[in-house]
Image (tube, coloured by chain):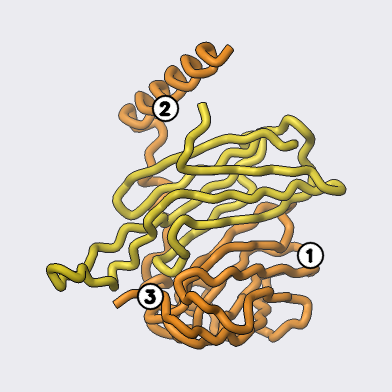
Chain colours: A yellow, B orange
């Protein structure tokens, strides 16, 4: 069931849940040139990331091409209990998407 | 146990696929909110105006920007923006000297902490600017990061 393209770690620390995630994505800016053809490699990047805790959105991230390749994202929210579900979903400029879930530990 | 979990996963993803094609989970509705003109803006002021409606943000010492003083690789510059301010609605990060300064923006739920950590690309030595909307007002902080090898490509 694990979706390898998004890794999530969610830990409860003193009344707040800290979520760390790593997503696999090329995050191409559209400014780079193909060394062989000299043509610009088209932009291909995650535009939006939705982070949910037990089905409720806690974070909406809007990204541009300046987010690094294989994006890392960490955030925290008050509350959360062990076993709660954290879900992270992204959608990119080509309409591709992915999502994964993890339990708070 | 593994087989059951695997089958559950397949059924679940199958259902989502069906729901998407049935138009129930229209991704378009979600993407419609992506601030195109803000990300296309070529200056910090233009980006702020487009995204937040204003170019004036009060400098605040309650916003901490953690980022390296010198970034060896401009393609991967870790940045953590944190604040003790209450009622944070959004956090936006701009790289002043990038071709398009707005790097990212985050909308927070009421119980989400004013804390974001990510990695950005920097084309050259530049200020990293964090603009936080809290209690309906804009606050900002910045930090200069020296870049030895630019990370925007080209």
- Residue A33 lies, in percent from the top left, at 23, 71
| C-alpha separation, residue under disc 2 versus residue under disc 1 | 37 Å
**Can marks 3 and 2 be said to lie on one chain?**
yes
- Residue at image location 79% in from the left, 65% down from the top: B86
Q: Secondary structure at mark 3?
A: loop
**On residue B86, which mark appears?**
1
Residue B39 in picture, x, y percent from top left:
41, 71
Real-space Cα separation, disc 3 to disc 1, in angstroms: 34 Å
Q: Tell me which residue sits at (75%, 62%) in the image.
A: B87
Q: Is residue A27 visible?
A: yes
Residue of label 2: B16
Q: Badge 2: how crowded within 10 Å, few (<14), some, or many (20+)? A: some
Q: Which mark is residue B152?
A: 3
Q: Along the polypeptide, which appears first: circle 3 or circle 2?
A: 2
Total tally of numbered discs in the picture: 3
Which residue is outermost to the right?
Answer: A14
Query: Of the residues tagged 3 and 1, which is closer to the observer?
Result: 3
Q: Nearer the viewer, residue B57 or A93?
A: A93
Q: Earlier in the sequence, mark 2 or mark 1?
A: 2
Is B137 placed above or below A11 here? Answer: below
Q: Position of residue A5 (x, y in %)?
A: 46, 42
The quarter of the image holding the C terminus of chain A is top right
Q: Which one is earlier in the sequence, the residue at label 3 or at label 1?
A: 1
């Amino acid at each position: 069931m694990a979706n390898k393209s998004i890794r999530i770690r969610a830990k409860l620390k003193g009344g707040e849940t800290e979520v760390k995630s790593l997503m696999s994505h090329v995050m191409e800016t559209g400014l780079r040139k193909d060394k062989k053809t000299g043509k610009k490699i088209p932009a291909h990047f995650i535009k939006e990331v939705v982070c949910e805790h037990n089905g409720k959105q806690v974070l909406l991230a809007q990204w541009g091409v300046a987010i690094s390749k294989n994006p890392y994202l960490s955030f925290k929210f008050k509350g959360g209990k062990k076993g709660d579900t954290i879900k992270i979903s992204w959608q990119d400029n080509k309409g591709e998407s992915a999502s994964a879930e993890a339990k708070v530990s | 146990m593994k087989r059951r979990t695997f089958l559950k996963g397949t059924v679940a993803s199958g259902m989502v696929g069906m729901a998407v094609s049935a138009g129930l989970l229209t991704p378009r509705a979600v993407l419609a909110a992506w601030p195109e003109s803000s990300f296309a803006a070529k200056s910090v002021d233009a980006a702020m105006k487009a995204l937040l409606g204003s170019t004036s943000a009060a400098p605040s010492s309650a916003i901490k920007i953690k980022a390296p003083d010198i970034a060896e690789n401009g393609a991967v510059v870790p940045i953590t923006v944190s604040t003790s301010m209450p009622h944070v609605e959004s956090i936006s990060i701009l790289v002043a000297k990038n071709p398009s300064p707005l790097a990212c923006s985050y909308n927070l739920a009421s119980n989400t902490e004013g804390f974001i950590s990510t990695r950005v690309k920097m084309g050259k030595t530049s200020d990293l600017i964090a603009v936080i909307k809290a209690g309906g007002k804009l606050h900002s902080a910045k930090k200069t990061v020296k870049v030895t090898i630019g990370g925007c490509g080209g």
